[in-house]
Amino acid sequence: MRGVLFLLCGELLLAQSATEEWTSEKYPPYIRRVTYFGERPDWSLDGKKLLFVEKSYGDVFEVELATGIIRPVTHHYFHNGYTRALYLSNGDILLSGSKTFNPAEPTDSRFRTPELWVLSKNLDKPPTPLGEFCWEGPAVSRKQLKIAWAEKHGTYPNDRHLYQMWVADIDYSPGTPRIKNQKMVLDNRAYGEGVLEAQNFRPPDEKELIWQYSHYRSSQSGRDVIDVEEVMGVDLETGKVTNYSNSPDTYNEPEGIFPDGKSLLVEDSRQHPVRAGIDLWRLYLDGSNRWERMTWFNEARKYQATNPVVSDDGRYFAFTVPAVGDTAGVGHGIYIYDLQAAAQARR
C-alpha cells in the first residue's frame, strides 16, 4: 500500500485512496487473519501463540501461529465463562470470570461479579481463585508476578460511585497462588468519581501503570453516556498521575503497549468528527501528544479495530475487527498486523 505522510495538528496521518475501504475480509497484505472466532487476544511470552476468549462468558483457547492449530485451555473443568485471559510471567494464565452466570442478566458476569483466578499452564486442574473481584480487564506484568486491577461499585452497591485501582504480587510459596503485598494506588473520589480501568504496566522498568479514565454524564434519555475518556498513567512509587491523551472530545482507550514503553496503541474515535466507531492509533508517551493512525477499518463507519496487544519483540500486534454497533469487546476472529511489513509498504 502506498500513501503520503502528513503531519497535521500533532497527528501523523497516512493519506489513503478515497475509494479504499477496509473490512473484516478486505485489508492490506501486512495484516493476516488467524482465527474466525474469538476476542481479546494476548501474546505468549515466546511470541509463538495467542491466548484468546472464545466469546464473552465463553471458554479460553490458544492458537499456535506456525500451524494454525487451536487448542482449548478451559475444557478440562466446568465453569461459568470468562471475559479475560492473560499470560502471567511464569506461563500460567490469569483469568477473569464469575462463579455464577445468569442468562437473563449476562452483563453481571462482566461488570459486577467477575473474579480473578490463576490457571496452571499444565492444564491439569481447575484454576485457583484469588479472592478478588475485577472490573473489566486486569493488567499483567510481563517480567514479574505482579498484577493490577480495578474494583467497582457494582460489587459494593452501598457505594455505587466507588472505583479503586489495586496492585499486588502473586505468591506461589504456599503451594497454590495467592495475592500478596496488595496496595491501592488510585481512588476515583479524587477524579470526579469517574471510572478507572487497569491496562498495562509500562515497560521497561514497570514503575508506572497505564490506565483508562472515563467520566459519564446523564443524557436526556436518562442513560449514562461517555463524557470524557482519557489515557492516563500513575507512578507506582510517587502516585503522580499523568494525562497522556489530553483529548476530551474523542474516545481514547489505551490497549497494547510497545516493549520499549515509549508508545502504546489506543482505541480512538478521532478519525471522525462525530463518534461513529473506533480505529487503532499509536500514541507516543513523550509528552508531544503525537498520534499515528494504524488502521482504516472505521473509514466507512461500518467496521472497527479493537483490543490490540503488542508482541514482546515489538514487531506485531494482534487485534479484532468487530462491526460498528457490536458490544464493546466483541470480536469475530483474531488478526495480526506486521509493523515491519506495514512500514515497508508505506515507503
Image (tube, helix red, strand yellow):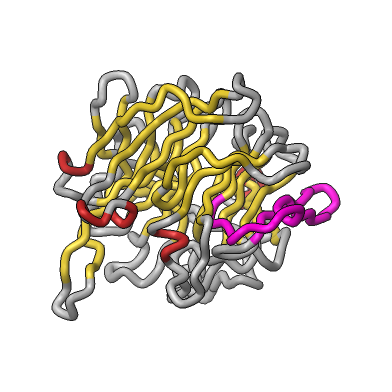
> Which image quadrant for residue 40?
bottom right
Residue 132 lies in the magenta stretch = no
- The percent position of residue 105, horizontal first and vertical second, equals 43, 72
User: At 35% from the left edge and 27% from the top edge, which residue is drawn?
Assistant: 183
Q: In this rendering, is residue 109 above or below 339?
A: below
Which residue shows up at 70% across the image and 53% down it? 74
Report if residue 347 is visible in the image.
no
Describe residue 60's horizontal placement relative to residue 209 as left or right.
right
- Residue 71 is situated, as x and y percent measured from the top left of the image, at 79, 54
Residue range highlighted in magenta: 59-84
Q: Position of residue 239 (x, y in %)?
A: 25, 25
Residue 64 shown in magenta: yes
Residue 248 or residue 130, whichever sits in front = 130
- Up-down: is 141 above or below 321? above
Q: Image point 51% across, 74% down: which residue?
A: 103
Where's residue 334, x and y in %?
A: 65, 59
Residue 29 shows in the view: yes
Whether residue 122 is situated above or below residue 253 in the rendered picture:
above
Q: Is residue 59 above or below residue 22?
A: above
Displayed quadrant of residue 10: top left
* Residue displayed at 25% across by 63% down: 226
Say which quadrant the N terminus sits in: bottom right
Nearest the viewer among 67 and 167 is 167
For residue 135, side relative to residue 160 (left or right): right
Extreme residue in the right direction: 67
Disc count in the image?
0
